[in-house]
Structure formats: C-alpha cells, structure tokens
Amino acid sequence: VNEFELIERLTTGLPLNASTRVGSGDDCAVLDLGLDGQWLIFKTDAVVDGVHFDTSALPEQIGHKAMGRCLSDVAAMGGCPTHALVTLGLPTGFDALRVERIYSGLRALATRYGVAIVGGETTTSPDRLFLSVALIGTVERGRCPLRSGARAGDAIFVTGELGGSLVSGRHLTFEPRVAEGRWLVERFEIHAMIDLSDGLAGDLRHVLKSSGVGAELQVDAIPVSAVVRGGGRLDNPSEADDATTKEMGGRLKSALSDGEDFELLFTLPAGQAVELMDGWRARFGGLKLSCIGRITSGTEVTLRGKDGIRPLELDGYVHFKGT
Amino acid sequence: VNEFELIERLTTGLPLNASTRVGSGDDCAVLDLGLDGQWLIFKTDAVVDGVHFDTSALPEQIGHKAMGRCLSDVAAMGGCPTHALVTLGLPTGFDALRVERIYSGLRALATRYGVAIVGGETTTSPDRLFLSVALIGTVERGRCPLRSGARAGDAIFVTGELGGSLVSGRHLTFEPRVAEGRWLVERFEIHAMIDLSDGLAGDLRHVLKSSGVGAELQVDAIPVSAVVRGGGRLDNPSEADDATTKEMGGRLKSALSDGEDFELLFTLPAGQAVELMDGWRARFGGLKLSCIGRITSGTEVTLRGKDGIRPLELDGYVHFKGT
C-alpha cells in the first residue's frame, strides 16, 4: 500500500457536515460557519526531523519551514491566514535553546503575515523532534480557487522558478506566496490553484484529475531554477539549443519533479493572461511569473518542445529520444 | 529546563492580533472572527506511540483517545466541536490495516459528536507512530468559561470519578464530556472550567493560579474511582474510618494526581449549586457530579478532613500524619 492508496482508503466515507464546503483532497479545508461574506480555511502540516530537514538546517529554518508550508497551502486557496497552533514533539534530552530558536523562526514568519500564534502544546517524542502547525484563515465566499476548477482553454501559470529546492536549501528559506495568492483572487478569475510541494508534474496532475481535464505544457516556458540550470545556460534559448536533449531532459525533470518549490500553480481564462502579466510586473516585479501552457479538454498531459509533442509521466519523467 | 518552564519561555511574546480573545494558556484558543453571536475555538493535541499508548491498546482505542483528548478540551470551553483535521505520522513499514482501524476509532467518536473530518495529512515518522488532531468549534460569545474566571465563594464541582485511568485502561476509552460542557454553559453561570488531564491537584492549580484565588477541598467529597478504591471500601464513610490514614492517603493521591481522567472541573456561584445538582440528576443521572469544595480568597489550597486542615501539594501529595 503506498501513501496515495492509504490516503484514499482513509478519506473514503469520512464524516462531513452541512458547514463543510471542501473536505479532504484540496490544499485546505473550506468551511462555512456563517461568517459574513467569508469562508473559513483550515489546514495542518507537520515536519519531522530526518524527513523534512536534517542536521544541516538552522533551528530558525526548521520553524520557518513548518510555518511556511502551512502558509503556502493557505496561499493556494487565496486565503488570508489569521491564527496558528503549534504542536512540538520533543525528543528525550532536547536542547531548550534549540527549541527556542525553532520557535523564533516560526514566530518571525507568523509575524510577517499577521498570524497570531494562539497556543499549541509540547509533547514527548522520544526519538526525534517533530512540529505540526495548524492554521486557520479566511477567504471571500466563492472566491476560493479549488483544485477542481480548471477548465479547457485556461492558461496555466506558475510563480517563481522550479527545481533544486533540496540541493540549494531553498526548501528551508522559501517565502510562502500569501501576498501573491491574495492579489490573484482579488483581481482575477482564478479557476484553480495549488501550491507546488510534490513537483509541478505531480501537483499539476492533482489539479487535472480533480478538474477532469488535460494539459499541454510548453517545454521552453517552464521556469528552471538557477541551481538546476547550473549557471543559467538554459536562460538563453540559443544556448539551450546547444544543450544535448539528455541534459535538457535531466534539467527539465528536476524542474518538474524535485518538489518542495512552494510556488503557486494556477489557471485562469486565457483572455485575462495579458492583463495578469502587466499587473504582476507592476506589483511583484522581482518575482517571475510564467505562462507554461494551457488546459485541454482531454485527460492527457503533454509537453510541446522543438521536436514535437510527448506525453508527460506522472513523476515528471520526460521521454526524450535516446534515453 | 522542565516542560512548564520551556512552555513559559516559548509562549512569552508570541504574536497575537486583534481577533484573539484567548491565546495560549487555556484549554483552547478563543477567536473572534466576526461570527454572529459566536466565538471560534481552536485546539490541537497529539498522541505518540509509547508515550500516550502502548502495544496493549487496540488501534481503534488509539484513534478514540487522539480525538477524545481534543474533544475534552473543547468540552472544557463549553464549546460545540465542528471540524477536525488529522495528522498521521507513519513509521517505516506501517501496517495499513492497523492505520485504518486507528482511523475508524477517530471516525466513530467524531461522528458521535457531529464533527466533520475535513482532511489532514500523512507524513513519515520513521521510528514511531504519532497522531495529531486539530479541532475547531464554536461557543456563544461571552459564555466561554476560562481558567481565569474562578471567584472566591464559588463552589467547585467535578464530573465522574478520578484516579486509576492508566491502570484501568479508561484513558483509552473515556467519553469526552462535550454534552455536559454544553449543558453547563447554557444553563449556569460557569465561572471557570478545565478538563482533568494532569490530575485534579495539578489542573485545579492551573485554575487557581490563572484566577488569583485559593481553594479548600473536602477530603470525603473527592470522587475516587472504583479501580482506586479497590472494591469500593471508601464509598462507605464508616468503612473509610477503618482504613489506615496511609491507605487513605495513597488512594486520595491517586484520585488527585494520576491524571488522564478527562473529566470536567468547574466553579460556579455557590447559590446555583442546588439547582445544578437537581438538573444534573435529571439530565445525566448515570454520571456522578461532586461538589468537592469552594474557592477561597487566599492563594493556598487546603484539604479538610476528619483530623483538620492540611495543605495540598502541587503534585497531589497529601501530608497525612505518620507518613
């Protein structure tokens, strides 16, 4: 039984109630508690020592990552995060100063986004430290983009650059795209949105499966991070032409499947794309925004490159000729 | 650094915001999100294999305990629980069937209280399983009893019977007092309420410290569980007289400090005590309700028995003569 099969089994037939708008299966749960003009969003996320970080991580970065992962999910709902609880599993003989430094990482990021830390608990976790953050927030009624909202003809956009997050250490220092998510849902008709944690290939599949649609991606448009580019060669299309297809395939695969990018992927009507790009540059000039393809009416995911169209595998593996 | 000192350090100067009514330091956080007539309550709680349960626990009981602990905290706020998220840390080579059985324990208890399970996540926890439940709910504005609300002259009540929860296995099967908590806040002026997780002696101290008051408890009124009574001898005052003070001290200490009772302790104006007892018997006849003493204006906690008044130690230890 793999993780996805187990989750499928566990989440089948869960108790729901009349105030549940969205239960399991999206970035956050969405609840209608009768709040004037708003829905509540609700999310938890955990990080475990040796799984989500190792001894190379600064304590502050561990706290930053734990809070940032939750904030990234709230961002993907276009939500405004408001309150957090922090659960801390402390190993035997923990170092109190290290724990305080972890907390200061949590606190700094929470403060930046106006999130109150309203409690939580410490518990014993004999072998290894873990942190679980629970977050609530609000989003305007009916403005919350779900994974299931993508429609054929939509343009697909992605923020920032992808790949190499674990190698570069960016997975410990990333900025959750909360401001960007809010800006998007306030100004555009965002049909679907997700944060990139499993890698573009996997996360796009979540959107497509939930929406019952396919996609065609443009190879050249996928924003490959500097660390993956290895010095920026793929930035320049003429140099990219010189790269062997095998090199390109490797780099592209990193961008598609390394995971932990914590960027936003979203779709909106293609007619809004130009206005979006203009507005984005004015507001978030320093952050790349790429139109990487379009939603199609089929169920396939294809990659269009110089030498034609190929299917994209679930894990981001790209079938280039000769490999 | 012990747990309480660490928590004190971590929770000093946490970021709060205007919508936070109660942050860390009570059973749940209380938030004002502008909900008509209601506050939101927010809580997380975790259980860890080998710490909160061992191999003797049925998987369903593990799920029951994880959900029940959170529900018990909501009960202590007089709240109505509505939605939960479940975080599952799964060890390497986990048994999928066992995980499904844990989930069915969670699910059964959630269903009983109308709580929707709206998602969560599974993550890798290589050495041992953990479960963290995040719960939200609602409570009528201004009706939420805090730890800080006890006043001199209040009567102190406790539901059920105390002690021996770990020995009897009751810590895995207890019923959270959600219905009782709701009933209390809807009908009476409950000044303070807390759920008994650390043991009466410790949890009463939390209330007294937050409220800046003391208490005098009646030894004979403390409801000692059947498993601690070892056959019910202390039920009968004349037999209790025959017990050695040492035996009595041991049993009383169990009731005061074993912990994990998950009963409610609350205070209300002494003038409402008779009406409370009458109403309680009519509504919750099967469940014991004991008036165990009163809130005093000092800061001391004393125990009044046949041979006078003695101080109660923080850990529940009772200084009986000759021991």
Image: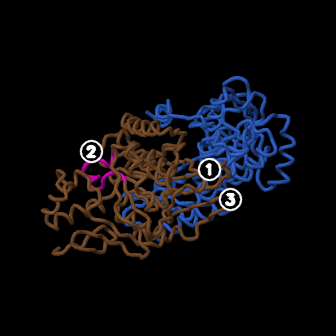
Chain colours: A blue, B brown
Mark 3 element type? loop
Q: Which mark is residue B38?
A: 1
Viewer-proximal residue among A249 and B151 = B151
Q: Amino acid at mark 3?
A: Tyr
Q: Position of residue B117 (x, y in %)?
A: 52, 39
Q: Position of residue A267 (x, y in %)?
A: 74, 37
Q: Residues within 10 Å of mark 1 (few under 14, many from 20)?
A: many
Residue A220 visible to the viewer: no
Cα gap from disc 3 to disc 1, whole angstroms: 25 Å
Judge if badges 1 and 2 mark residues of a common chain: yes
Residue at image point 85% right, 48% down = A279
Mark 2 element type? loop
Please identify the quarter of the rendering in which residue B242 is found: bottom left
Label 3 is found on which chain of the structure?
A
Assess whether residue A192 is covered by the magenta stretch.
no
Q: Which residues are magenta?
A: B159-173
Label 1 is found on which chain of the structure?
B
Please identify the quarter of the rendering in which residue B58 is found: top left
Q: How many marks?
A: 3
Residue that numbered label 2 is attached to: B56
Closest to the camera, between mark 3 and mark 1, is: 1
Viewer-proximal residue among A266 and B158 = B158
> Is B275 located above or below residue A18 in the figure?
below
Mark 1 element type? strand
- Give the side of residue B226 with respect to residue B244, left or right: right
Viewer-proximal residue among A109 and B159 = B159
Label 2 is found on which chain of the structure?
B
Cα gap from disc 1 to disc 2, whole angstroms: 41 Å
Q: Amino acid at mark 1?
A: Gln
Q: Amino acid at mark 2?
A: Ser
> Which part of the image, by quadrant, shows the C terminus of chain B?
bottom left
Asked whether the beta carbons under mark 2 and mark 3 sit within 8 Å of each other, the answer is: no
